[in-house]
Image (cartoon, rainbow, N blue to C red):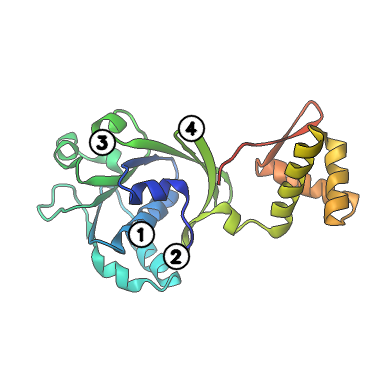
Amino acid sequence: MPSLPRILWDVLKGKRVLLVSDYAVANMVFIVEVSLRLAKKNTVYVAYTQPIRLELFHNIASTRRAEDLLEKIILLDSLRDGEIGRPLIVYGVDYAPLDALSSLNNAIVFATAFKAGKLARILRARIAKLKRITGNEYLVEYGYSRFRVIVDPSKGVLPVRESMPSNLARALEELSKAMSEYGPLTYRDAVYVLMGSLKIDKKEAQEILRTLTMKRYIRIEGGYVLLEDYSI
């Protein structure tokens, strides 16, 4: 399996997390990702209060050659099922009856919701918010940190740098080095830094800066290039 973004590490370490986002499929992929991770050690119970694409479990497990873990994931279409056990993962927890949440909150380790409301208090959970940047790349706001992930219906949740094109990763590295050595860079300075360090022409350097801006790795303010502070 791929390396873990921080939010998944915390769940595996026993911290309860509530993922809040408007993106149904992304929420489902997170549910599958957490389920497969936990199933490596325990039988996992996954309850869904709204329709969920069950084929995602098979697609992601198959991509990772981890189909055997599916036998340890028990799917439940209700939170009132008498066979619910621990650890419990819930898709669409904001649609669950409050009395069910009150009786099962100690079993829930991870849940997704479209709206948080009072759920963080009821579940005693940390909130993570998911926002789409572009395509299958998302920004996770979690505690005091922000980090990027790829949410792929066939591969699961990946740290974005595992899928980041090498030219963009190298460009960010060179810009960071230049800023550490020389201080703030004007847009023109940044173009020349990329031209010199990557051995590319002006047009390509400008295109890389446009891409980094679009993907929110950098921003342009007052003619200066500023790096966004994202943890990975």
* Marks 1 and 2 in Cβ contact (< 8 Å): yes
Residue located beneath label 1 in the image: 37
Tell me the kind of residue under disc 2.
Met
Residue located beneath label 3 in the image: 123
Residue located beneath label 4 in the image: 144
Tell me the kind of residue under disc 3.
Leu
Residue 9 rendering spot, x and y as whole percentages: 40, 50
Q: Residue furthest front?
A: 181
Marks 2 and 4 sit apart, C-alpha to C-alpha, by 27 Å
Comparing labels 2 and 3, the label whose residue is closer to the camera: 2
Q: Is residue 222 left or right of residue 137?
A: right
Marks 4 and 1 sit apart, C-alpha to C-alpha, by 24 Å
Q: Earlier in the sequence, mark 2 or mark 3?
A: 2
Q: Residue sitting at 42 percent across and 46 percent down?
A: 7
Q: Residue sitting at 18 percent across and 47 percent down?
A: 79
Q: Is residue 110 left or right of residue 210?
A: left
Q: Hey, which quadrant is residue 176 in on the image?
A: top right
